[in-house]
Amino acid sequence: MSELFEKLYATIWQQVFPGQRAFSLSAAKDFFAKDIILPQKYSTVNGGPVYVSPEYGYKKFITQEETEKRSNIDNFMDRTEPIKSLNDALTRAHKIALFRGSRAINSELIEESDDIYSSSYIYNSTHIYSSQKIMYSYNIKTSEYLFASKGSADSSFGIRIIDSSSVSNSFDVHWSGKCANTYFCVDSYDLRDCMFCFHLTSKQFCIANMQYTEEEYMKLKGILLKEYFAQLKSPKAFVLVNQL
């Protein structure tokens, strides 16, 4: 991993957890990206490395560079031979059945990723569209500065933004929209400064669906996050909201 992505991770962390010392990058991946489908490293038939999402079930791979090289030689065409059965066709197809990995179109600064479109600064992610500065994520659209997120769009500075839209500076938010500075919230809309809330709309300074003053909320937020990080390495730790 380049230093560029290590700095990107630090930037995302400080926006989501200001003042909290960041985990190591490997620890953050282990805690927060376990259930996210990420590209895995495979070898091409020529021995080169390539990254492909395991969801496809592909078995033989080829890189973009290898594809271009072969295309310039014979455009992948073989000598015509008689085909008399399905087995004949499968035998011939098996010879040229190479699936391209590390795919990217109109994108730059992509590492260990696959199926990237019009995006930049992407690390170990797949199905990323018109986004930038994304790490360990799956199926992200028009977003930036996301880590360990999936199925989300129009969001920024988030860790574990799941199936949500227009979420910013938040952690572990699921199936929600138009939320900011929220933590462990699910199925909610138009929240700001809330924690552990479910099914709420247009609320601020709430914890577990209970209303607090701004002063009360900020004090409790500090206490809860401190305890959250302190207990993470215990065997029975609460890590993510899907454990509730």
Image (cartoon, rainbow, N blue to C red):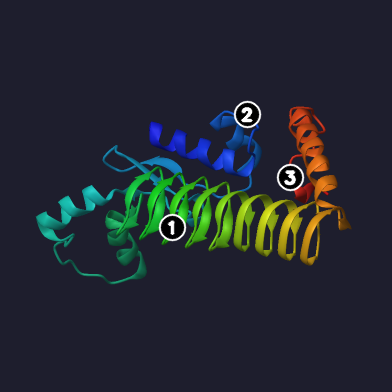
Quadrant of the image occupied by residue 45:
top left
* Nearer to us: label 1 or label 3: 1
> Which of disc 2 and disc 3 is earlier in sequence?
2
Q: Is residue 202 above or below residue 8?
A: below
Q: Secondary structure under badge 3? A: loop
Residue 21 shows which numbered tag? 2
* Viewer-proximal residue among 107 and 195: 195
Q: Of the two numbered discs 2 and 1 on the same chain, state the one appearing first in sequence.
A: 2
What residue did someone put label 1 on? 131
Residue at point 48% right, 56% down?
56
Tell which of 84 and 59 is nearer to you.
Answer: 59
Residue 119 is drawn in which quadrant?
A: bottom left
User: Which picture quadrant has residue 76?
Assistant: bottom left
Mark 1 or mark 3: name the one nearer the start of the chain.
1
| Residue occupied by mark 3 | 240
Looking at the rendered structure, the secondary structure element under dot 1 is loop
Residue at the bottom extreme of this rendering: 84
Q: CA distance from mark 3 to mark 2?
A: 19 Å
Q: In the rendering, which numbered label is found on residue 122?
A: none
- Amino acid residing under circle 2: Arg
**Which type of secondary structure does the marked residue at label 2 adopt?**
loop
